[in-house]
Image (cartoon, grey):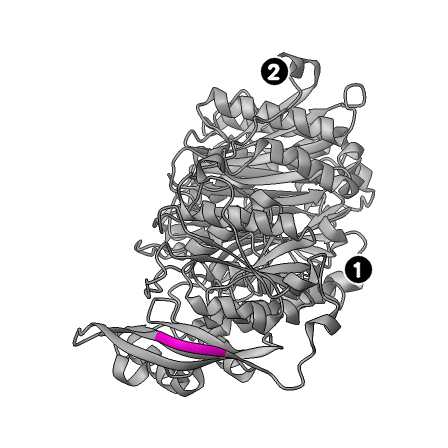
Amino acid sequence: MKVVGLVSGGKDSCFAMMKCVQYGHEIVALANLLPADDSVDELDSYMLVTRFVVSYAKCMGVPLFRRRIQGSTRRYDLSYKTTPGDEVEDMFILLKEVKKQIPSVTAVSSGAIASDYQRLRVENVCSRLGLISFAYLWRLDQSLLLQEMIETGIVAITVKVAAIGLDPSKHLGKEMSYLWPHLLKLKELYGSNVCGEGGEYETLTFDCPLFKYARIVLDEFQLVLQSPNSIAPVGFLHPLAFHCEDKPNSVSLSDSNRSNGFSLENMESVIEVQSECLETVEEKCPPSDTGFDLAELEKHRLHISKTGKENMFSMSCWLQDSSETSVDLQEDLKIILLKLESQLTEVGFSWENVLYIHLYISDMNMFAIANETYVKFITQEKCRFGVPSRSTIELPLSQVGLGKAYVEVLVADDQSKKVLHVQSISSWAPSCIGPYSQATLHKEVLYMAGQLGLDPSTMSLCSGGPAAELEQALVNSEAVAKSFSCSISTSAILFVVYCSQSTSKLDIIGMQEKHNAFLGKTKLLNLNQSLSQVLDPIFLYVLVPDLPKRAFVEVKPILFVEHDIETVDNDQVMSDVKHNVNQFDSCFQPETWHDECLQKCLVHGRICAASLSITTEIAKKICSDAISANADDLLTITAEENMGRVAKFCVYRLDKVLLQNFFSWDDVMNMRIYLPTSSGISHETLSGIFKTAFDEFDETTKRAKIHKEPIFNIVPVIGVGSSAASMDDIITCELFAIKS
């Protein structure tokens, strides 16, 4: 891509541009914001640069666009909305002018390492201008990062120091190669940021591999002691004179043939951007054009499922028997999202209360169209606490009598959710360019977006086949988890691994082996860091028709992020609880095989997750009084009358898990029932079977309230199982309960 580099004069912005070139991009322009007063030597704001940056145009042979800041300076808010008079709007005007004069520019590079303030504001401006944000230094290990900067030839000196262990008289004006050992020592002693991300020091770059035509030479300077604090004195270097020194054997601009549509005589020029008043920058988000009236929804056979919790619940919407009413995926998705929006409004909620969205579509070839429809409903403007995380999967919807779209939302009524939404392309983890986040933390549960095996730096699927993709997806998941101070190897409650049907059986088995090996290796590393708790997660492998980008695999973890809550021994909880006998117990006397089909993960009376896998063999045992022991015909086992008994067993067994761990059906936040299309049972039929089972259970036990909508959500798939080697369950139930 053609990239404009946001430059501050420091080492980070220069090295970020070097990373862009390393990944095949081209720097065609520079952009910087000037302080309101040229005499100001303070470098506290990342947007403020010194007069040195003017020389970068000559050193690199690219034009420099700059604008003097007219708006107010930094606001300590980690979200940003268009605000006339804010310094971010100066950046908007600046980059808008760059794009106008050099239309080939499609991306912006910034040197953000750990600053959410900087990254979020650059991403905001980029999204409004249709540009991509590159932040290749984001969340890299600072010790290794500084070492790489030095080894790759960046020559930068300190021009400000303001931290314990840094003495202005000793450390100002020193090159990074000289200070590196001392900075590592300060990190060990005081936890200082090696790259100066905490304001410990600021730098100016005099030379780097991008400076092909000249380097900067400092002729004269003055050291100024601003604060003689005995612990952390503050001082800065005031440049008095400098010049550019041509590099020998450099190619002339006339020979470089790199105009990129910009006039050759202006390739080294400095363009002052002054047009457009700040007050005119604010752009209001146009209202969503859904193209539907609520009354029109009555024409469609829209169905809703909803769990019973009042303050936190999941809700799903789908089109039943849509052959007469369904037009296309876009149309189906529109009416489903409109229906969900109206349902949320009815109970006093909106899209800002949504934590997670499962977007199921019938054809992955229509993903771009589905996304266009999605972003008309779920936007950053509508989600002031952060956009929800999302997983997108192709499902065999039509095979079970459904429309072309199916949406499930997880909703909470409080404002405590925290999202991680990184839209910049970096080396950290795949970016989320659009209104969905990498992860959403609510209370103690981290809901992670579906992770593909993408190389974060290129956003392309990694090579090497399914196992390699799975490993990269796990690496990406671990990077996201680390942002919340946890690990997928120790904190995971549930792993759902979606496998594309284009993957061979042998490759799928290889993926599970890779999964186990990765978690084992990562767990050892984290145990060495004395993490307090290690969970035994549930694994579900789901075979689906297709995944985004034609990926072989998509991983969706749910993690527990521990707060300061007293830990309770789960085994002790199990042994202390007495299960009250009811009529359902007489139907299913306790057997050892009841536990063979069950996976569960418990968190000290706070979370109860369970998965029930009903294989053909288990179904035979459940229906032993209705079919012969030698019955091998799947159709016999999945006949409606026998499936009714299977459904009854599922409700019974899950109830027992809840009750034995002090949970009730009122605590259930989500319940999915995976339906393989090989069963030959329609979505509507299975829904009726499970509704009957719940009605009978409630009538017998009075423990599961009967609601207007079913509390379960039936998800059609090609295959499902607790093991990648045997995704041939008749049905699988996934349950997640949380104590309020």
**Picture coordinates of residue 525 (x, y %)?**
48, 74
**Picture coordinates of residue 311 (x, y %)?**
41, 32
Foreground tag (1 vs 2): 2
Q: Residue at x 66, y 44 (%)?
A: 392
Give yes or no for contact between labels 1 and 2 (Cβ–Cβ under 8 Å). Answer: no
Q: Residue furthest front?
A: 265
Left or right? Give the position of 264 relative to 425.
right
Q: Amino acid at mark 1?
A: Lys
Image quadrant in which the C terminus is located: top left
Q: Is residue 249 above or below residue 359?
A: below
Residue 505 is a magenta residue: no
The numbered mark at residue 505 is 1
Relative depth, front residue between 480 and 610: 480
Stretch in magenta: 239-243
C-alpha distance separating marks 1 and 2? 46 Å
Q: Residue at x 47, y 72 (%)?
A: 11
Q: Main secondary structure of the magenta part?
A: strand
Mark 1 burial class by Cα count in 10 Å: few <14, some 14-19, many 20+:
some
Q: Amino acid at mark 2?
A: Leu
Left or right? Give the position of 256 relative to 156.
right
Instruction: Provide the secondary structure element on which disc 1 rests.
Output: helix
User: Which residue, given by chain and number where applicable, does mark 2 sit on?
Assistant: 294
Relative depth, front residue between 564 and 245: 245
Left or right? Give the position of 327 relative to 180.
right
Q: Earlier in the sequence, mark 1 or mark 2?
A: 2
